[in-house]
Amino acid sequence: MSNDIILEGWTEEQPIWPSHSRLYHLPPVGVGTPLVESLTSYIARLGASHSVHPRSLLLVEVAPYLSALAHAKTDELRRGAMSRLLTISAVWNGTTGSAKNMVEALTRLTERQDLHLLTLLPFQEVFSHKKLLRRSRAWCSHCFETWRLASLPIYEPLLWCLECVSVCPVHNQRLQWCCPYSDCARMSPPLTGRSEVGYCPWCNRWLGSSFHLLGRAPSAWVNEEWKQQQWVATQLSEVLAAVPTLPAPLRRENALMVISSYVNETMSGKHAEATRQLGLTTSTVRQWLSGERIPQVRNLLQVCLSLDVSLLALLLGTAHATSGRNTPPPQLPASETKRRPFRRFDAETLHTALQEAVLKPEDPPLSLNKLAKRLGYPSPFLSHHFPELCQTISSSYQAYRNDKRESTFRARCAELDQVMAHLRDQGLRPTEKRMRGLLKSPSILRLPDIRGAWKGKLSEMGYT
């Protein structure tokens, strides 16, 4: 009997282990819903899942896949590249090449194939990148607090990144973009080096809690205007929720077909009347139809409001435009302006600082613009409140500039005389080519006053 024991089901084939991603295969939040996560929020959560700040994650893992950050020859990270990149982090949620590059880099690192759904890349053919995304971070504190109490993931939806959205469609309150704590009150880009979702990157305090009371509809807002803001948020929410089911790529010809049909058929080719009914200018519509310009989101929403159709139906080309109205179309309200925090005007302190600049000027003296920047005020503001002191500072700086210009001219003329005399002593004509080879700064011969002095000196030496 053989000593070999053959076990049933045994195989000598090597097992095939599944490949794993470089970074965590972190699933995004809300794909296929109105509050789909933004890519900048995903980066912040991905960094938190690895217990590192977003800056470290981008610097160590993502930067090698972004060729624009490194020198072509040395492959070393350009100086200040990461800081500049975080400053413009809003574009990663948009339709440009920067968003595409970031998606491709994170896809390779996480092996997730759905990260493009966290941006507006599916709409790059239908939405212009102009006035598409807000540059500063915005949030609904009520959403943050609700998710925290329900132990749900804290994240920032892509909807909050859109410039024309000012209202949360879930809680019908204004979005906030300044830290609610009075000793901070700062705005921030969508992603910073130390971002943590739901917290202020500057003071590291929670942005939820009872601060949702700050977002209630103010009494100063017109009721109809508030409804239009809610309508804008609802329309864009519907479009973002439908992204996974939309045809790829989405073409703007569908929306233009609806607009063209309205202009040529419903309005019988009367372009001026049609554009008036749409609430747009004639040149804007003509540029759309000719393919010269991609429509902006707000203008497409204006078309939808004027024609009483949904934005999703317009993008798919299934909307049916109605006949013109007798009254002017309603105009969408502009996005809420960003107001600077209130700053008290300390006239006595400013007067003392300006007077000190006059009595004890620095060497070299400061210009009014630089002094105003140091004090934190625009120079026209200081000139309006302290005209005499500002005029004295400007005159003193202008006198310094004139003296410096005169001394520089005299030094250049002295060097010019020395070089010309040297060439003459060697029996050489002081031509422009020979002069350039001996001057410390050959480019000064291009200056009109120096060139005039050179030609005058040639005549004195007897050269014609």
Image (tube, helix red, strand yellow):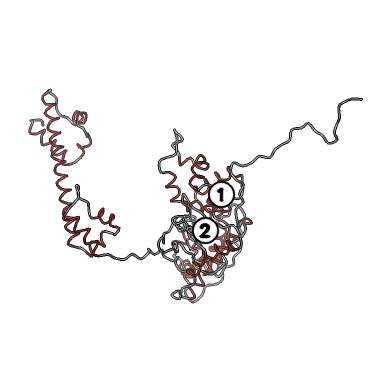
Above or below, 376 against 74 in this view is below
Asked which quadrant contains residue 136, the reply is: bottom left
Mark number, residue 198: 2
Choose the circle earlier in sequence order: 2 or 1. 1
Coordinates of residue 198 in the picture (x, y in percent) = 52, 58
Q: At label 2, which amino acid type do we have? A: Gly
Q: At label 1, which amino acid type do we have? A: Leu
Mark number, residue 46: 1
Residue 329 can be seen in this image: no
Q: Which is nearer the eye, 83 or 463?
A: 83
Tell me the quadrant of the picture where the N terminus can be found. Answer: top right
Residue 20 in the figure: left or right of residue 352: right
Q: Which is nearer the eye, 219 or 205?
A: 205
Q: What SS does tag 2 mark?
A: loop
Mark number, residue 321: none
Q: What SS does tag 1 mark?
A: helix
Tell me the quadrant of the picture where the C terminus can be found. Answer: top left
Coordinates of residue 113 in the picture (x, y in percent) = 61, 47
Residue 108 in the figure: left or right of residue 213: right
